[in-house]
Amino acid sequence: MTTNDGAIAAVFDEVKSQAGRFRDSGPKAEERRWIPDENIELLEKAGVFRLNVPSRFGGLEAPVADQVRILSEIARADTATGWVAMIWVSSSWVPSLFPDETQKEVYAEGSLRVSTGFTPTGTLTAEDGGYALNGSWKWISGSRGAGWALLAALLPAPDGTPVPHAALVPFTQLDIADDWHASAAAGTGSSTVTATNVKVPARRVVSLPEVLTGTTGGRSNTGATGRNYAFIPFFMAQGASAYLGIARGALDLFLERLPGRGITYTSWTDQSQSPLTQIQVATAANKIAAAEALQDTWLRLLQEHADAGTQPSLEERAEVRGKAGFAIQLAKEAVDELFEASGASVIMRDVPFQRFHRDLRGLALHALFAFNTNQEVHGRALLGLAPDTPFL
């Protein structure tokens, strides 16, 4: 229980009450390659962008399980809005790992939207007590509506070795390309972002290895605060919430579309009476439920460590990656099962299910959430081998 329980519950209730409006916006988001401004306003009004803002700055500082529940509900209503909300909310937690001075600056409004590029395709050069940031980052979801960007770039160590760092930069100092033309997740506005000699004060640059291990300094909110989660497991948890929400939404759409439908070229005039359809629906529903049950295990692990002020072991981190990747695979298989049961008319653009199917399959290709990669990481840990990746 937290002092903000009532406010957090109110966010969930408001999001749920707007589900119909989010769902109806799907075609518009896909057409304009970006979610409608109205959706952002509705999420802002509901308090979604306060979920990860520390309470001392007027935020809700919600536990990760509450965040996941809300984010899944948004994705259940609309794929693009759910994905963008997940990116903004999860990324808005990262500034809490920066020095106190930076936190005060970034969280000043009590509500925050951050888009992230954690592939270090930029460079940082020491300059005038700060740094000059240059580079481009592809596939920055939500870039057209975020206030801040969290971008990874290489900074030479004293011996010349390039070390990845994370830099916080206002989007007003960046260029956003109009280059997002995708067959899946089209409404997420995941454009390329470019920094050209952007001046970044030292307080807004931290070592990425320290971020990954939770050892950043200069901040007072360390220890057993209940919100010092392990970085990669936290993002696995947040990301999985979108996939599972999309799968749940696809099941909703399938069941809503079923009444009155027959099966063409068969004697079935009511598809729901077909044993094959019954098996397909039950299989899909149980895969989604199994994925959600797996989700409970890593959410509990994350919160127990955050409450105790400890960090998960490498084996536990690998386990989160493996379980989250497996849950996402189950969600994808569930939606594939329902797609196969939907008949040829499901490919028409005016059938919302096809967008959920396309978007889920496309988003499942995301490198951090890819099935085989995460099973390999988990399998190595189970076999007592080194993880072979720093992203734990």
Image (cartoon, rainbow, N blue to C red):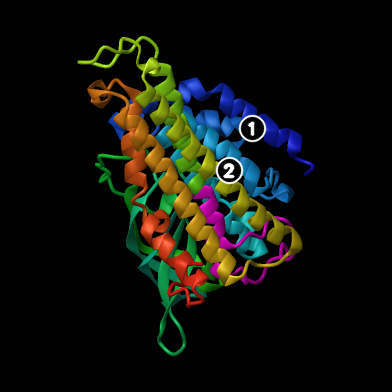
Which amino acid, by three-letter code, is at mark 2? Val
Residue 240's place in the image compared with 377, above or below, is above
Q: Which mark is residue 68?
A: 2
Q: Determine whether, in the image, residue 214 is placed left or right of residue 332.
A: right
Mark 2 surroundings within 10 Å by alpha-carbon count, few (fewer than 14), some (14 through 19), many (20 or more): many
Location of residue 30 (image quadrant): top left
Query: Disc 1 or 2, which lies upstream in sequence?
Result: 1
Task: Please state which of the two labelled residues, at mark 1 or mark 2, is closer to the viewer.
Answer: 2
Residue 115 in view here: no
Q: Determine whether, in the image, residue 160 is placed left or right of residue 348.
A: right
**Magenta part of the chain:** 212-239
Look at the image and say whether residue 216 sits in the magenta stretch: yes
Quadrant containing the N terminus is: top right
Residue 230: percent from left, percent from top = 60, 62
Looking at the picture, tell me which residue is in the foreground, 166 or 241: 241
Looking at the picture, tell me which residue is in the foreground, 288 or 242: 288
Location of residue 229 (image quadrant): bottom right
Residue 186's place in the image compared with 161, above or below, is above
Residue 222: percent from left, percent from top = 71, 65
Judging by the rendered image, the residue that carries numbered circle 1 is 11
Mark 1–mark 2 distance (CA, rounded to whole Å): 12 Å
Residue drawn at point x = 43 percent, y = 50 percent: 171
Residue 373's place in the image compared with 128, above or below, is above
Looking at the picture, tell me which residue is in the foreground, 204 or 337: 337
Q: Determine whether, in the image, residue 131 is placed left or right of residue 310.
A: left
Residue drawn at point x = 65 percent, y = 72 percent: 217
Residue 328 in view here: yes
Look at the image and say whether residue 238 sits in the magenta stretch: yes
At mark 2, the secondary structure is helix
Which amino acid, by three-letter code, is at mark 1? Val
Residue 385's place in the image compared with 193, above or below, is below
